[in-house]
Amino acid sequence: MVDKTVIKPRKSKKIDPLIIDCGLLSDIEWTGTVSATALIKAGETSQKIIEYTIGHLNEFYVPVNNRARTRCIDGRHDPELDETNLGSQVPGGAPGAALAYRLGVDEDDLTRGTFLSDAETMVGNYIRLGFAPGGHRDENSHGQLAVGCGAIDGMDKILATMTQKGLVDDHKRVVKLLLGPKFKRDDYLRVMGAAVVVNDRAQDYFHGREEIIDILEKRDKKSVATLKGEHKECIVVVNLINGTTLSSNRLADAFDGIQAFGYDLWRSIQMADKLLPRPDQVWDRERFVMARVMSTVATLMALTDGSQRLVLRTAAA
Ligand SMILES: [Zn+2]
């Protein structure tokens, strides 16, 4: 006899991805050194290759594995990347979320606390919630007082850039573009205010931050990658399609080594839901996502000169 009580899993609706080319990140010069203009000038790539890559981006998105270590947005080569087992990409990996929590959610006195203790707590949260934390070094960072992750090493610069005179308006423009109808001016201004306060005591707050990668490694050796090669990011892709991520090694292999910064914005929204699950925490969730997107844009401002192409990957309406 057939057991009719078996519940069949509902077929998930297929999502048609839409690639939206938003043009250059900025028309003004940002403070970072990674430059698509310079790479084109040096003959490392061309406008044509960049256009072609954007046209084929969807072919490099794969289902994410929640158990696979969280990756950074960094587009450099990861020699140990398991192509069948990719974690999502967020700036600075798991420790990177700590700054967003501090700026957007934490009720503690902003004049106290350190990034290191915030990041340790965040790594613990990842483990508790069933996500594999992750972070990275690079091949130049061994024996240095830096980890080799721009999103962590440059965190003081990122915060300073976010609050820098002459850049705030451009920062807000990009954050608005990424969040669309989810952009709330009040949240933006509140997180910006917190950034000003923390930036004022950046030396104390970020003291010893490089230790976080050692701590992460002690908790799980496999959670830390060592990236190789130079930064050659010519494209920034912000991905809004749940459960998908960029196969960054494969992309660089296919297009003569040019790379993309990949940010899985959907993961930040999912993290907010997991970290702050109660119905009364709706504002905290919004502010966490706002702070994560604001710090991501500031990271791009501090790492690049703004000449990369900004691409949104979202579901077709
Ligand atoms: Zn990084």
Image (spheres, helix red, strand yellow):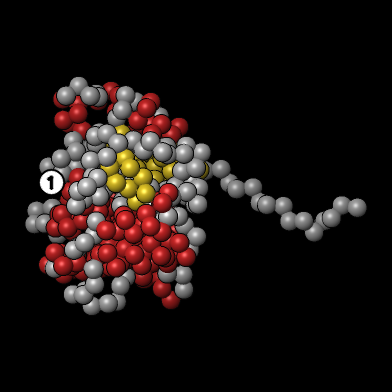
Relative image position of residue 151 (x, y in whole percent): 25, 51
Residue 90 visible in the current orientation: no
Q: Secondary structure at mark 1?
A: loop
How many residues crowd mark 1 within 10 Å: few (<14), some (14–19), many (20+)?
some
**In this picture, is 286 found above or below 88?**
below
Relative image position of residue 161 (x, y in whole percent): 15, 54
**In this picture, is 31 found above or below 248?**
below
Residue 284 visible in the current orientation: yes
Relative image position of residue 52 (x, y in whole percent): 34, 25
Q: Residue at x 28, y 23 (%)?
A: 48
Q: Residue at x 47, y 48 (%)?
A: 68
Residue behind label 1 places its C-beta within 8 angstroms of ligand 1? no
Q: Residue at x 80, y 59 (%)?
A: 5
Relative image position of residue 195 (x, y in whole percent): 19, 65
**Amino acid type, residue under disc 1 in the picture:** Thr
**In this picture, is 20 found above or below 114?**
above
Q: Residue furthest right?
A: 1
Q: Residue furthest left?
A: 165
User: Which residue is denoted by mark 1 in the rendering?
Assistant: 31
- Which of the pair 120/198 is nearer the observer? 120
